[in-house]
Image (spheres, helix red, strand yellow):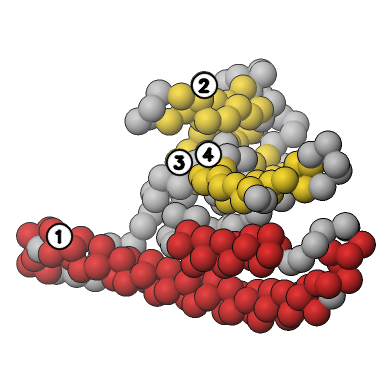
Amino acid sequence: KFSADGILEFISANEGQILAKGEHPTVSDIQWDPTGRYIATTVSSFYQKNDNAIWFWNCVGRCLYKMNLRGIRTFIWRPRPPTLLSAEQLQAIKKNMAKYNSQLANEDRMLASKASRELLEKRQKLLTEFNIWKNAIIKLYNKDEEERFRLRGMCDGVHSKQAIVIFLSLEDYYLDGNVKFLIFNEVIKKNTQNRPTSIVFRIYKHDFQSHCHQFKVTYI
């Protein structure tokens, strides 16, 4: 019962794995509380004249509080008060446990559905704001179209319009529950005359690592 090292190990009984290790030097008594969620380690004056103390831990091995009490002999948790339910009420609860479990599961599903609906509404709002911003950018982009193609040495804006049309149509097609973020990576390839010949767009999944679709616009 007396331990000079005071090494404590908290083990999961279901999985048989060590959750945590602790240390209470010269610990002499260990008491679990009636709920099974907390534990008290005591250095009793019966075994140790100095450093008498009580340390409180939670069930996963984290020390919550240290109380030094000189001369302490014994520590006992206060017993749980008797239930206010009668024996018939306890029996009825045990008998209808499956019904209560089903009711609580339905309430959990309703709460989860509410959270999902709020998340979808938030995403829809962000998408609407993004579309407004995107349309303003496209409008500004088209405004300078002639000057832009003149500087690039291109004859007209057919290729740019073609790419924008495909961009918009694919955005509507891939906006579903599986693709949470749309990222378009533009890669411009040029020919020997230093003019663009094709543009490659990639639509990435929400993990930003692997793309789920790729398409190519080739200039003729």
Q: Which residue is mark 2?
A: 1
Give the left or right position of residue 153, taking residue 185 as reference: right
Q: Residues within 10 Å of mark 3 (few under 14, many from 20)?
A: some
How many marks the image carries: the answer is 4
Q: Is residue 185 above or below residue 147?
A: above
To which quarter of the image does residue 197 belong? top right
Which is more toward the observer, 119 or 146?
Answer: 146
Q: Is residue 128 above or below residue 5?
A: below
Q: Sequence order check: which comes first, mark 2 or mark 4?
A: 2
Q: Sequence order check: which comes first, mark 4 or mark 3?
A: 3
Disc 4 is placed on an element classified as loop
Give the left or right position of residue 119, taking residue 160 as reference: left
Q: Sequence order check: which comes first, mark 1 or mark 2?
A: 2
Q: CA distance from mark 4 to mark 3?
A: 13 Å
* Percent of width and height locating residue 151: 92, 62
Which is more toward the observer, 123 or 14?
Answer: 123
Q: CA distance from mark 1 to mark 4?
A: 28 Å
Callout 2 touching callout 3 (CB < 8 Å): no
Q: Which residue is mark 4?
A: 60
Q: Amino acid at mark 2?
A: Lys
Q: CA distance from mark 2 to mark 3?
A: 15 Å
Callout 3 touching callout 1 (CB < 8 Å): no
Q: Amino acid at mark 4?
A: Val
Residue at 38%, 54% (x, y): give it: 79
Whether residue 85 is visible to the viewer of this picture, yes or no, is yes
Disc number placed over residue 97 in the picture, else none: 1
Q: Which residue is mark 3?
A: 32
